[in-house]
Amino acid sequence: MRSFLLFLSLLQTSGLAVEIPQTHGAHPSLLSKYRPTGKTWTCLDGTKTISWTAVNDDYCDCPDGSDEPGTSACPNNTFYCVNVGHLGAKIPSSRVNDGLCEPTCCDGSDELAGVCENTCAILGDIYRKEQEAARKLQRTGSKIRSTYIAFAKTEKKRLEAEIETFQREVAVREKEVAGFKDLVDRTEALSAEDLKRKMGSPLYTSLITHHSALKSLQREHKKHVEREKQLSDILDTLRRGYNPNYQDMAVLEAVRGWEYLAGLPHIGEAEREEGVDEEEETTQTDKADEELEEGEWSALQLEQELDGLLNVDHISLLMEHEAYVDDSASVSHQHDIKEYLPDFLILQFDLLRDSLVSWLQTLGVVKGSSAASQATKARERLNDAERTLNAAEEQLEKSRKELADLFDPAGYGPEGEWKKLQNTCLTKDSGEYVYEVCLFEEAIQRPSYGGSTFSLGRFTSWNTSPDVKTGSAEYYSRQVYSHGTRCWNGPERSVKLDLTCGTENALLTVAELEKCEYLFTGTTPALCLPPEWNKESGRDEL
């Protein structure tokens, strides 16, 4: 081999180079431009005209290097390998005639004839078998994908029917709420008049008078307590500061009187002899003071509970009293007819019943409940109706959002092909840990032999690369899960899930590329486009 390479080198240096066709190494798309005009040829950039025999003569004549497509004479040029029986390929022209067989040029055209073996037939056969296997997998996967699309269409019909049902229910509930609001307005107007009349009753007037008197007594009591405190401070100061041996009898009597009244021991030697008896006497006096009649409040109760009693809402108390009287005076033995009525007739029944009862009460045929009680019941019905309306509106909004996301390219795909896989969980046992990702939900890491389970992140988006177009196959080839459990002294855990076409939804590999940043790979039929949709390729067909 070395002798052969030496022979080639001698041929080139001795000027006995092998003649090379002018189109050798030119890309098929440029062959039409490699034609002489008489005996001359113009460089592809149009800057120079040279002899046709100067093309591929192993000397760079054109500034753009276009005169040497089949040699290494011009730098930064490319050489095209035809590779008959396989796929054509391009290599840098610097690798032409370097004595090394380029695997990309299976036909050996990058070297002189006889240097490299032509393996294109073998490689082409292997490539075709691989392509056929890939097409078979793609066809099978695309059939499964079509079932996902059919599911999305069924889901669309279900959601549309659900939305229509909720729209009708919302309309019915809105009418109910409007009816009950009108009923509440009317009953509360009657209740206000009825309440005004009841507030003029002797019972309510007396209650308010007693309340005012009690509040006045509390005010005066607080004044006296404050004044007593000030006086006691003065007497305590006098008691501790006077000299019983030199003060006059008036001061002594005042101090002794205060000690007796306050239950305090004497200051001086006399208190040692008399202190015990007086303490017993004071204790007996205190016990006598604590003996209260039934229903009376102690001083502690007055201190702690009187404010609460004075803050009672007398209007509410009056209405509760009326409701108690109404409930005690009336006992109904009738069945609830509403239990046998459909929902859409309940409102009409309530309004008709209320109108009839009101008319009978006006005629004096029946004695109805008070206006306050009616207003309370009407308000309860309105609240129930509004809660039911809010629930229906929430369901309607939820269904509308699901329908909007169903065929959203940034959601479940333009054909809804990913909706079927929502919350489909893929697992991979690595031995120490079991990794699981539930599509569109969350990825987790669970120890195989006990311990804490960590969140690796929740679904955030599809492929976020700036050069990837939303809705493209590459866009759906990656899912991003972020904001997982934070690592110790590290970032929040996150996952990038790279997917390819496959006949199964499976998780294949798990790797931690950086601290707490994981790369999962997997397969899914959702990425198996029909073969006729997948003709975008950068390589030539056989």
Image: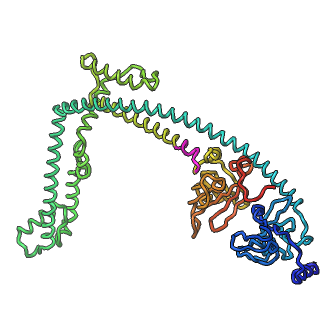
The residue at 18%/38% (across/down) is 207
Residue drawn at (23%, 57%) of the image:
283
Q: Quarter of the image holding residue 419?
A: top right
Asked whether, in this view, residue 276 is left or right of residue 30, the answer is left
* Residue in front for this viewpoint, 54 or 302: 54
Q: Is residue 383 magenta?
A: no
Decide: is 323 above or below 476. Answer: above
Residue at the front extreme?
38
Is 404 inside the magenta-drawn segment? Answer: yes
Tell me where residue 50 appears, x and y as whole percent. Answer: 76, 74
Residue 355 at x, y percent in the picture: 31, 21
Q: Nearer the viewer, residue 194 or 77?
A: 77
| Residue toward you, 467 or 328 | 467
Quarter the C terminus occupies: bottom right
Residue 4 in percent (x, y) is at 93, 78
Residue drawn where x is 42% and y is 23% of the image: 345
Establish if 432 lies above or below 70. above
Say whether residue 149 is left or right of residue 80. left
Q: Which residues are magenta?
A: 401-409
Name the quadrant containing residue 326. Answer: top left
